[in-house]
Image (spheres, grey):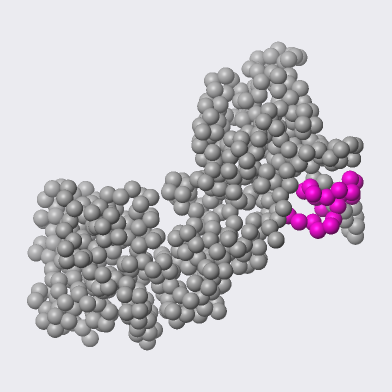
Amino acid sequence: MTPPDNSNGWLLRVRGLTRIYGEPDERSVARTGPRAATNICPETGAIVACADIGFDLYPGEVLGVVGESGSGKSTLVQLLYFDQGASAGEVYFKPIEEGAKNLLALTSQRKRYVRNHLFGMVYQNPRDGLNFSFSAGGNIAEKLIMAGQFHVGKMRDRARGLLSQTEAPAQRMDSTPRTFSGGMQQRVQISKAIANHPPLLFLDEVTSGLDVSVQAKVLDMIRHIQTELGISMIVVSHDLGVIRMLTDRTIVLKHGRIVEAGLTDQILQDPQHAYTQLLVSSLL
Amino acid sequence: MITGNGLTSAYNFAFIDENTKKEIRRKLLKAIAVPGYQVPYSSPEMPIARGWGTGGLHVTLAVIGRGDTLKVIDQGSDASVNACSLRQFIHKMTGCRTTVDTAEATLIQTRHRIPEEILTPQQILVFQVPQPEVLRTVERLEDRTRQMHAEADYSRMWVSLYESYVRFGSLMRGAGYPVKVNGRYLMSPSPIPRWDVPNLNDARCLYLFGAGREKRLYAIPPHTRVEPLEFEDVRFRVEEWGNTTCAYSQQGDAFLDEIYENEQVKKFVVNDSNFLDKLRSGPRPPQRLFRNPE
């Protein structure tokens, strides 16, 4: 296999990424999608959660993934973060062998390394990203330990710094996140995700469970961190407000397919696809 | 030799049949070849209940030969009911000599302690292990812990030590302090006190571990690197008794038991009974001592 061309300097290249649940036949992908108005194969009952997803992400760029419930956007980031295995596709990532190696073909040990050292993930539900039986500081320490930090004093300093960077209560770092408010839990989760300076951060509906004023503060903080660290992000949201505020480019998913991709401003101002037009016009 | 009524003579040497012994020995060889790795094994039925030392008994009976001299220790004592019963059973089934003298034994089955007296290359120490999975405290699912071992993903155990430091100011863990064997596998040393953990490192004898209820064997071959988990600035420490000495031998530098004579008066006594006997009757036996970092 020839290594993919990287002359335009992409950080992450995704090609043909597909995830199908159930038992598909060879035409299940063709029978589903926006034109069929379903992602359930009528013949086999297989669910085509996403199919043939392809995009490039550039260093320092924020990519939005937007779509309604069940459009496959969470599946997409879970595939990229190795939370679940892909049915088909290729993912190339610049820091891994100069982007020559398909991440999906790595051994589980290598995948773990990529997850722990090069990716950060913030889930919608803080319980997925944090261990509530450990303290907030312990959760961040876990990430630092993965990267080979074994000095308690330095770990605590770093955790304190990260928590104040995300405007979380650093003086409460020794209590469990269970005792924190939802917004604070998200801030701790973000602190943990960026603890190792990952080049790529996934944000899956991070503000969806928060009330509007907290949402605005958390989004502001994320944008601040993004400009400060120059970190690349993939932001999944059903909320066009979040997409507008955070992202440079956006892909629109429907029934597991990309129906439109382009600059965020362009998509929001001048949506081409009927579904995107519907999304934009239904914005409150 | 096996004597008495016709029933006992129907048993094989060392109770377990030869095929099963062979299986256990093969698993032990595998365990020795991969230090610290938990090898599943058959764990056949024994005439004692699981959880009462069947794992140690399996290992002992699988490796014992007619020329062996056996010692059985329970929490440092040769005289507890459990130690006596196991010693009598093994003696009855093998006819092997038994002893309480640590130096004289070739095979020692133990629960919760490593003898204070230094063990030699001619000796094998067999541990009874209640819970072989060191990660069980941080992960309750077996398939997840196996995955964690396979990927050497021990960060969660490290975080639990971090949490213990945050809560108690030290790496508190009364027994079964997690150790890394040969730079690879994290292993539970069985519930020995921290005092004994440094004795696992670069030892001259062979350590075998048997967990009967959980059906796992593991081993530390002689001269293997065994490191207790510790942070760069928060170090592993063994138990300290200050200037307290043993009430009978007036000596320190051994694991001490706290014994209450009555509700007001307590005293400290050397836990290893054979070591205490030797301290009282003659020169101090050779010992490996670990000094806590400053």
> Can residue A21 be spotted in the picture?
no
Residue at coordinates 73% horizontally, 21% vertically from top-left? Answer: B96
Start-end of magenta stretch: B239-259
Residue B251 lies in the magenta-colored region: yes
Q: Main secondary structure of the magenta part?
A: loop
Image: B275 above or below A236: above
Percent x, y for residue B36? Answer: 54, 41
| Residue under the image location 23 percent in, 69 percent down | A58
Q: Position of residue B12 (x, y in %)?
A: 63, 17
Residue furthest to the top in view is B6
In magenta segment, residue A197: no
Q: Is residue A94 visible?
A: yes
What percent of the width, then of the height, locates residue A191? 43, 72
| Image spot of residue A212 (x, y percent) | 35, 85
- Camera-side residue of A128 and A68: A128
Residue at horizontal 14 percent and vertical 80 percent from the top: A266
The residue lying toward the viewer, choosing from A253 and B135, is: B135
In the image, B275: left or right of A132?
Answer: right
Residue at image position (25%, 52%) is A101
